[in-house]
Amino acid sequence: MKTFKFVISVIKFILTALIIVIIGVILIQRFSNNNMSLAGYRIFTVVTESMVPKYKVGDVILVKEEEKTNIQIGDDVTYMGKVGSYADKFITHQVIGIEKGKDGLLKFHTKGIANEDEDPLVSEEQIYGVVQAKLQVVTFLNGIINNMYGMYFLIVIPLAIIMFTEFRAFKEDKNDYDEDDEDDEDDEDSEDEETEENDDNRKTIDKKAKKRKEKRAKRRRRYE
């Protein structure tokens, strides 16, 4: 039974920690406008249909910083746009060509899978990284966070329940521990009382024995 409770506690702890970490990463990336990275990784949320069917609106993708010379044709890259309607926006499109510019920097030709036109030329310093994966679990949680009711019923309430049950279990364990201490004290008191009773019994026996000896001594003196 104790092993089962321990396993359940470990599972609850791992799930809680995982949810907190994922939500934390999402919130940090959102409020930092993706200017912060964790070990070279960033996450981005797809907001257009330019990469359908590969990435849909609302999908969360994991992007890793990469040496620009390692980027190849066919890679999906995330970059900061600088021209026209792309300016100051994070764009995730596929590399369709690479060349070296007169300034010595690599220039990337990119295009959305669903788009007919190629993007404005992208310089290597604009690129944040290469897409590593689409994060299904984070996509699901991100959708919940963006929905007030989903956030409340699927994140806040479950976390509150987990915290309440953990606190209650902690209090029960503490009460059990205190009761065990009280039982130990009661046992010690009982032992002390028994010891005192035994001492009193011995004293009574010694007194009776002493009285018998005195009576025998008196009888002997009479007959002498």
Image (cartoon, rainbow, N blue to C red):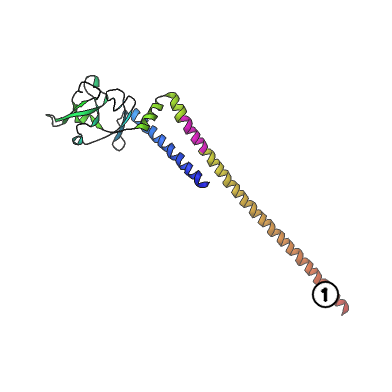
Quarter of the image holding residue 132?
top left
Does the stretch in magenta take in 94? no
Q: x%, y% of residue 113?
A: 24, 25
Q: x%, y% of residue 149?
A: 45, 24
Closest to the observer, 97 or 25: 97
Q: Residue at x 73, y 64 (%)?
A: 202
- Whether residue 216 is situated above or below residue 22 in the rendered picture: below
Direction from residue 166 to residue 30 in the image, left or right: left
Instruction: Report if residue 36 is visible in the image.
Output: no
Does the stretch in magenta take in 163? yes
Quarter of the image holding residue 38?
top left
Direction from residue 8 to residue 213 in the image, left or right: right
Q: Residue at x 81, y 70 (%)?
A: 212
Q: Which residue is drawn at 49% across and 33% down?
A: 160
Q: Can you identify the residue that label 1 sits on?
A: 217
What residue occupies the far left of the structure in this picture?
102
What residue occupies the far top of the structure in this picture?
84
Q: x%, y% of residue 206?
A: 75, 67
